[in-house]
Image (cartoon, helix red, strand yellow):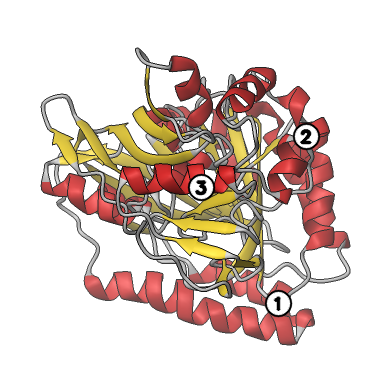
């Protein structure tokens, strides 16, 4: 089998809040390598954890046994431009996939705001973007290949092992190792982005018309203010208003990363300044309109490190949730340095998707690395849970299997598939024990 690292191979996630040292690090190059590794692990009574790019904030990738990294796995790439399908190794990053699709005149229908995740990691945790007509990225999965806990290779689609497909599209890596994924794409398209500041109360009043009136809508609320930054993205026929390079650098590099990082460091050092910093930040982001290739508009650089919790809520509970959140922020014994992000998704049919069966509003709360966050996150989690919220699988939360089971109509179906595919719990970790049982 391809390369096994030393027994002291350390790992940390992007945010630096999760760390682990594996007993061995596996770098399979072929499907047979994956099968061999799983069978050897099972025979030894050990566990194996496939990991992606480390962009989850939870301990979903943490293991002290065997870690499997899929960066070298080559299962081939197949692009069917007629049927608009692409099949790629599961360790492919979204950034690489976006460039591949663009070269063939294709694109993913929707994306989140970063593209560093692997395909397997993104779909396994329910990564999503925003848009009233779109569920999470897992809804684009047409087929996948999975190596189960017994070393069996399963091809899964609507026609072949459909129950496994329903479970594996969001599985947290609990069912096996994803080795390749087939995604449904669309013709390449251009987006017109409109970003503008506005009062929070005005935006909440506009939402019934704003959400269905645009392809994609999101907004950021700046704590200690009544200001938000609203962003709408809509498909347009031509890229006739590209963002000047200097403006892109000014807004996305200097202001959103360099200056914002400095503001966060200042706020961490002198918390009393945070409300003023938040007010200045809200005013610094001015209105802009531009066009660009879809993935370039969806995804923006994120270099300021933070931790995050996100909840998917029934959409009609959003005003109540935000009002409670504002009260929480005002009462905290420390200051919140990051804006709150709000996005919207369609209902979907993926068993463990946060958006299963309902139109959702997502509220994401963040905090700058090195600053207190747990009381803030826990207080909002209590509100979100009482409103029927489901935690994003890749973001921090404190729910367990007992509290999560009633939130998912297909929870028992997922457990049935899991018991069948991984009867000896080769893919079990302490984190999965807590949230899945």
In three-dimensional space, the C-alpha distance between marks 3 and 1, rounded to whole angstroms, equals 40 Å
Question: On the picture, is 5 further left or further right than 17?
Answer: left
> What percent of the width, then of the height, locates residue 286?
44, 65
Residue to which mark 1 is pinned: 370
Q: Which residue is mark 3?
A: 40
Q: Give neighbour class at mark 1: few <14, some 14-19, many 20+ (Cα, 10 Å).
A: few
Establish if 191 lies above or below 356: below
**Mark 1 or mark 2, which is nearer to you?**
2
Quadrant where the N terminus sits is bottom left
Is residue 348 at all visible to an observer of this figure? Answer: no
Disc 1 and disc 2 in contact, CB within 8 angstroms: no
Q: Residue at x 42, y 45 (%)?
A: 36
Real-space Cα separation, disc 3 to disc 2, in angstroms: 29 Å
Of helix, strand and loop, which one carries label 2?
A: helix
Report which quarter residue 76 is drawn in: top left
Front of the two marks 3 and 1 = 3
Where residue 298 appears, x then y in whole percent? 36, 50
Q: Please give the name of the residue rendered at 70% of the width and 61% of the height, measured from the top-left corner.
A: 223
Sequence-wise first label, 3 or 1: 3
In the rendered view, would you say 358 is above or below 353?
above
């Amino acid at each position: 089998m391809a390369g096994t690292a030393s027994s002291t191979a350390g790992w940390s996630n992007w945010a630096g809040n999760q760390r682990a040292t594996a007993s061995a690090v596996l770098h399979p190059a072929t499907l047979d390598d994956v099968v061999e590794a799983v069978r050897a692990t099972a025979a030894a009574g050990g566990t194996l954890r496939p990991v992606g790019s480390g962009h989850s904030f939870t301990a979903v990738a943490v293991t002290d046994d065997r870690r499997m990294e899929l960066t070298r796995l080559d299962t081939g790439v197949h692009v069917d431009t007629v049927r608009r399908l692409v099949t790629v190794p599961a360790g492919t990053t979204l950034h690489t996939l976006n460039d591949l699709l663009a070269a063939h005149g294709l694109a993913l229908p929707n994306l989140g705001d970063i593209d560093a995740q692997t395909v397997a990691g993104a779909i396994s945790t329910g990564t999503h973007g925003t848009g009233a007509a779109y569920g999470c990225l897992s809804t684009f999965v047409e087929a996948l290949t999975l190596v189960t806990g017994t070393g069996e290779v399963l091809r899964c689609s609507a026609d072949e092992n459909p129950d496994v497909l329903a479970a594996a599209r969001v599985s947290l890596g609990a069912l096996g190792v994803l080795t390749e994924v087939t995604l449904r794409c669309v013709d390449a398209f251009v987006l017109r982005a409109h970003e503008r500041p506005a009062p929070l109360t005005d935006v909440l009043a506009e939402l019934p018309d704003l959400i269905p009136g645009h392809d994609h809508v999101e907004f950021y609320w700046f704590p200690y203010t009544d200001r938000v930054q609203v962003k709408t993205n809509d498909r347009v026929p031509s890229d006739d208003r590209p963002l000047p390079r200097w403006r892109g650098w000014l807004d996305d590099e200097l202001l959103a990363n360099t200056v914002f990082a400095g503001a966060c460091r200042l706020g961490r050092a002198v918390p009393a300044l945070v409300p003023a910093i938040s007010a200045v930040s809200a005013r610094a982001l001015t209105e802009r309109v531009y066009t660009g290739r879809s993935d370039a508009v969806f995804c923006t650089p994120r270099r300021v490190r933070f931790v995050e919790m996100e909840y998917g809520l029934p959409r009609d509970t959003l005003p109540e949730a935000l009002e409670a959140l504002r009260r929480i922020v005002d009462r905290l014994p420390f200051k919140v340095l990051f804006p709150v992000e709000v996005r919207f998704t369609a209902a979907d049919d993926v068993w463990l998707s946060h958006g299963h069966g309902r139109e959702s509003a997502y509220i994401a709360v963040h905090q700058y690395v090195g600053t207190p966050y747990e009381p803030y996150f826990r207080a909002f989690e209590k509100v979100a849970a009482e409103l029927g919220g489901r935690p994003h699988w890749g973001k921090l939360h404190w729910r367990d299997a007992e509290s999560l089971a009633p939130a998912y109509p297909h929870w028992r179906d997922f457990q049935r598939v899991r018991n069948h595919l991984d009867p000896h719990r080769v893919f079990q970790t302490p984190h999965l024990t807590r949230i899945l049982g």
